[in-house]
Image: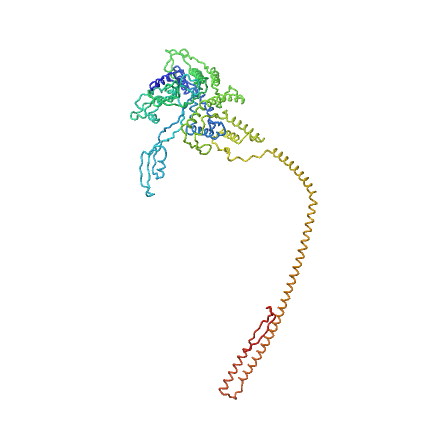
Amino acid sequence: MAEMSDADLVSWIESEESQSLGFHSGDLSKERELALDYYHGKLDVQAPEGRSDVVETDVRDTVDGMLPDVLDVFLSSDDVVKFEPQGPEDERVAAQATDACNYVFYRQNNGELILYEWFKAAFMEKVGVVKYYHEAYATPLIERYDGMNEDEFQVLLSQPGVTVLQHSAAPDPSMPGMSLHDVQVRIVDPNGKICVHGVPSEEYRICVDHNSISLKDVRFFEHVRPMTVSQIRAMGIDVDPDQASDVDTTFSPEYIARRRFAEEAFPGEPSNSDPSQKLMAVSEVCALVDRDGDGLAERRRIVKIGKTIYQDDYADHVPFAAVCPTIMPYRFFGLSVADNAIMSQKTKSIIKRGMIDSLYLALTPRIGVMESMVNLDDLLVGRVGGVVRFKTNPSLAMQMMEHRFVGQQAFPMLEYEDNAKENRTGWSRYSQGMDANSLNKTATGISLITSNSAKRAKLIARMFAATGVKDLMQGIKHLLRRTRAGKPIAMRLRGEWVNVDPREWKTQWDMTVNVGLGTNDKAAQAAQVGQIMAVQKEFIAAGKSHIVTDQNLYNTAKRLQETAGYKQEGEFFTPPNPNNPPPQPPPPPELIKAQLDQQTKAAEMQSSERIKQMEVANGENVAKIQQETSIAVAQIKAASDDAAARLKAETDLEIARMTQAAQASIKVFEAGHEVDMAQQEAQTQERLADKQAENTITTEVVKAAAKPAGEEKSNGEDKGEQKQLMKMIAELARASTADREVVRDSKGNIVGVKLQRKMK
């Protein structure tokens, strides 16, 4: 088989388009247009001129009433999905994949808004579709920075994806030799990001033979949307603005019905001065087609604008996910919530119109008149207190045509239609807290009604989770592994920043979708979690901590926190950390008492055994101990006697030595005392002799000086006497000098003192 040319590929795509479901001229498009009109309060039954045209809003009430219950199932938890590991070695990477996919969905994309639009589209238009893809390109950001120093400027230039558009530098007055920079840059994220957004029903087509709500194996799926030339070029496609693209085909009846105002139904052509804003129809096809002619169809992604193929490559997945509220077996399209409520809205609107018309006629009945006898101008004026002029008897000229109000007969019909709608949709008036006098008002009755309504919402949520939501999250994981390989992602997971490397993830995992707690009643949820917690406490009290682990307890507490509406993990409870195990809880009192009793009995038995052993050992050791004691006493006594004898001999010797020393000291003292006494006596005698000599000399001197006055001496004689007198005084002074001499024996010991007299 020959290879398929671009022209043949375009013809094949156009053929599939014309036969696909969702083409704007088909029955499916008309039904979706009708559902949108009914949601906006429009009715396909025109009221006669002058009659009531009131419209009920059952479709809107039912869709907007059921949507919060289904959304709450998903938004009550931070995790839309959870990847389950296949073995213990996969625990860490499975948790990373779970957190990373939820991070991409909720933080990098507006996950809450995506779910709201996705589910609401399914409620109104049978099927809701979202698209997920990796956007390698990004809308560039133009930013300007003024007064940057040199370091800040270099850091900016080192960032990936930064291109300088304008730059100027000036000297820095605060730092000589440095500059301040004013710069304008274009910033493009080189890594891109994973994008998720809804696809309006008028923009996609699907082959008629597809028999599943899942799009994983779809044979032909096309996404056709109007895009500006600028958006197309941002995709990396160099498109010619003058090329024909048949953009009018995107403005289908569904497109017009979705837009309530005439101003937005048909966008005007842009000004010729800005061709980048021209709209063109861009077709992205994901199909199984044998392009290479080998006889086997391969999955390909094709981008077509008009008659031109711009991109054509192999594809390893279908980047679309779909959900349907009421799935029809073996079909892609099922029934929407609006389909189940359209008939009720139409019937109730017609009944209410008749009731209002009947009320109008009862309040303002028609009047029969004789035209020639009544002033018709006065009669046609419905002014209160107005005057009607008559030309004859009023009873003959005018007759009131009474109309009986029949609205009371229509009220049971309205009630019947409400009950029928509740049976068809599963949404009850009790679901929004309303009361109805005609229904069961007991607590048990209301509980049964709300429980049945919750079951329908629960079923829809489970089907959404098991089909489109699961496909979407698996697709996000696949894109993370493929586009971020070798590029770790820095993200805040479980309260801390970590680098996640998608290369560590396996290609296949068992995955479960977290659909909240399985019920929409918060009080019932809290009660159920409380019951689970009570059972866990009983297991722990019974010592079955291997059945209820720390992780089980944390999961219960976290679910209770989520039920209360607090989503921040770690705000009230800290996840268990294997590196920091909690302290072991004390065992129950009964176990402690049993252990103490057992330990006491064992101690008593051991004590009795030890006593017996000691008694036997004592009987054998008493004689030995007594013998050893006697020997020890004898040895101690002998040693004591020897020590006493030695001590006595040493004492006697010391006493003798001390006595001899004392006697010698006494003798020396006595000898010294006698010498001192003799010396003192000699000194006394010497002083007496000296005194007597002094007195004698004095007397002689006095006598010499006292010679009689008549006795004359010669001059020579007188001088000789004076000299003799002076000599006597000097000898008297020398006579008073004395000295002692110490007397020693042959050994050098002092034995006495000898007094000597020296005269000169």
Residue 440 horizontal/vertical position (percent): 52, 20
Query: On the image, which quarter does residue 316 sit in?
Result: top left
Residue 752 horizontal/vertical position (percent): 61, 71
User: Quick one: quadrant of the C terminus?
Assistant: bottom right
Residue 287 horizontal/vertical position (percent): 39, 20
| Furthest-front residue in this view | 746
Residue 27 in view, yes or no: yes
Query: On the image, which quarter does residue 302 sit in?
Result: top left
In the picture shown, does residue 419 fall above or below 145? Answer: above
| Furthest-left residue in this view | 273
In the picture shown, does residue 722 fall above or below 405? Answer: below
Query: On the image, which quarter does residue 202 sit in?
Result: top left
Left or right: 538, with 562 as reference point: right
Residue 393 in view, yes or no: no
Q: How many marks?
A: 0
**Residue nearest the observer in this picture, 166 or 277:** 166
